[in-house]
Image (cartoon, rainbow, N blue to C red):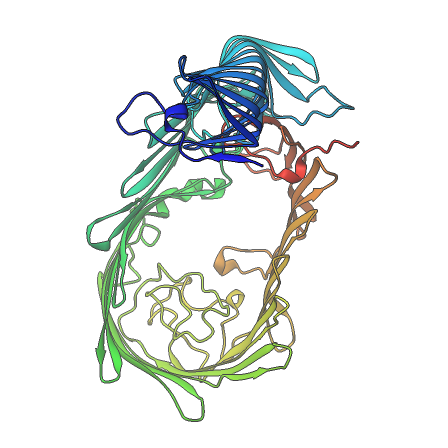
Amino acid sequence: MRAICLSLALALAPLSGTAQELATLVADELRVEGDDVLVAAGSVEVLYGETRLEAAGIVYDQSTDRISVTGPITLEEGDQILVLADQAELDADLADGILRSARLVLDRQLQLAATQIARVEGRYTQLSNTVASSCEICAANPTPTWEIRARRVIHDEQERLLYFDNATFRLLGVPVAYFPRLRLPDPTLSRSSGFLIPRLRTTSRLGTGFKIPYFQTLGSHADVTLSPYLSGSTSTLETTYRQTFPNGALRFDAAITRDDLLPDETRHYVFARGAFDLPRGFQLEFDVEQVSDESYLIDYGYADTDRLETGVRIFRARAKDLFNASIVSFDTLRGAEGAISDRLPSYYGTVDYQRATPFAQGEVVLDVNAATLSRSSTIDGAGRDVSRLGMGLSYRRDWITRTGIAGEAEAGIAGALYTIHNDSRFGSEAARLTPYASVDLRLPLQRSSAGGVRELIEPMVQLAWSDVTGDAVPNEDSILAEFDEGNLMALSRFPGDDRIETGARANVGVRFTRTSPEGWTLGAVAGRVFRTTSENDLDGGASDSTGGFTRGSGLGGKSSDWLAAAQVRLGERIAFTGRTLFDDELELTKNEARLGYLGERLALETAYVFLDGEPAENRPRDTHELTLEGEWRLSRHWIGKFDTRYDFDVDRAQRSGLGLEYRSECISVDMSLSRRFTQTDIVDPATEFGITVALAGFGDSRVDETFRKRCDG
């Protein structure tokens, strides 16, 4: 019969302090020998704080305040530290002592086997003649993929660091590196100063080089990573700085380079972004994007962007009001735009405030807005600068009739004052007034089947009217108009305020939704816009080639193109979205689709887009592209990766890539090969090869358990 002692305060409590923590001891046999010796035998278990000790037998000598333990011994501290040993001598609180023929297991990942383990002050664990590895070792294959052999290892439980003396790193049993001193984070530490895993990068333009990152913590809320990148053609220093604050966070990514591509120049880039909470519910966001030359980002693989935006935004959204203010500056990296960069907007600033006030079973909405845009050029027309101050007032309410028809009505008026410089086609000052009204009607019809399937069909119609009176104004914020399911029932499909849809029109559509208890859903929308006139607010009376709806938008004429869109989701595995615009002759204006599949072995994402050529939208030829990205788990440890972007219009790939990754419970090796085929005046085709090796068990690098090796037999 098992003997239980629940309050061995004198036997297993710390000697210091006035209040002693009680220990719990469970054993098959418990006896006292003489006056000072307590003996527990047979399936002994001791619980003391977060420490749990299991052993075959324990002898406690009160005169020496020491515990002798016979194994097999299991000593656990919380969920992160596990010690296995054959024999141990410990003090009463289990904080200090020596364990022989022992193994230390950290966070169920990293194992350190030693001839002897000494515990010191409850904080340090010293291991002698140690072998460390996170690899599974089988009887048929006793050699781990990698291991570190060291004369001594010290584990600092408080700092969560491992210190190795005279360490040899072995790969498949072969010594490949020696370190007189080595410091590594244990598996529970996500941030620790030191060198990170190097990366090999080979490109056709820069040759073969290595990136050797060094990570430095700057307190608990900031860190910096410095990554020298060296090859025969470049000397580059990359850096990333991160910092969190009680009210936000910021991040800087930058690099500085001297290379053979532009030997007489120092190349660089700086990207920065941040977000902060301000008093009274306001939020601040900023982005900084600067680069020394047009091809730097692509040459070094930092980004594919071809236009840079630097700006700041302050906003607040509450139940009844919305405030948004931003200012953005632009810079182009497109070679074709380099010669006219001074004619592109230098900066664009906006301020918008909206407030809704309940009134007469509805609400009155006040909108005050302003915008300003400037260009560096002073050429007439091409160097146009514009400022706008606008105000609007509207009333809207919604209702549901007894027959189930849901309605919403809105009426209002908006006005704007413009100041215009460097464009003789317009006056220096202009004013516009826009009255408008709309009524939306929907009839939701729902059906449920006995199997739990629910279907909803919703015919929709919006009757809208608006007009513009006043002076001609340039179009700066409504050049590209999109037609999709999100604005089918919108008063105006122009994205900004410089252009307004005018005349009487009817937006007609139907929405269908089907949900199944098996986990799949279907949503579809179809519709069209009908107008009483084909004229729109093209230019307010002045000639401006960027005004109005283009054919490529699908919105031109008295009747728009037909819009059809669908979304299908089959549980968590398959997701599909598609959208198309076509005319009465079924000629496509736009067709885009995206498909994602997530299976046990295959993950796939593909996107297809076709856009009819439209010179007015700076698209002189058709856009016809397919992108494909995927991962295929070839076996337990191997993963194949692939991606491509193919241009059907020119019948060639723009880029393609292949990758192969090996993962186990203790190591991952990622190899990639990519080719960019496009060529411009500033960018040449390039091939890149990269390899990255990461060891599990150090730092926060836990590997999916499905990659763990299995020992058969």
Q: In the rendered view, does 365 fall on the left or right side of 482?
A: left
Q: Nearer the viewer, residue 482 or 62?
A: 62
Residue 137: x percent and y percent? 69, 24
Q: In the rendered view, does 484 fall on the left or right side of 136?
A: left
Q: Is residue 158 visible?
A: no
Taking the spot 56% from the left edge, 38% from the top edge, the residue there is 680
Q: How many marks?
A: 0
Q: Nearer the viewer, residue 711 or 325?
A: 711
Q: Is residue 242 visible?
A: yes
Taking 287 as reference, is 15 above or below it? above
Indicate the quadrant containing the C terminus: top left, top right, bottom left or bottom right: top right
Taking 552 as reference, is 653 above or below it? above
Indicate the quadrant where residue 499 lies: bottom left
Residue 232: x percent and y percent? 56, 15
Q: Nearer the viewer, residue 461 or 524?
A: 524
Taking 304 as reference, is 266 above or below it? above
Indicate the quadrant containing the N terminus: top left, top right, bottom left or bottom right: top right
Query: Which residue sits furthest bottom?
Result: 402
Q: In the rendered view, does 457 fall on the left or right side of 16?
A: right
Residue 17: x percent and y percent? 28, 24
Indicate the quadrant where residue 400 lies: bottom left
Taking the spot 33% from the left edge, 65% from the top edge, the residue there is 498
Q: In the rendered view, does 466 fall on the left or right side of 47?
A: left
Taking the spot 65% from the left edge, 26% from the top edge, the residue there is 135
Query: Which residue sits furthest front?
Result: 34
Residue 467: x percent and y percent? 32, 79
Taking 652 as reference, is 170 above or below it? above
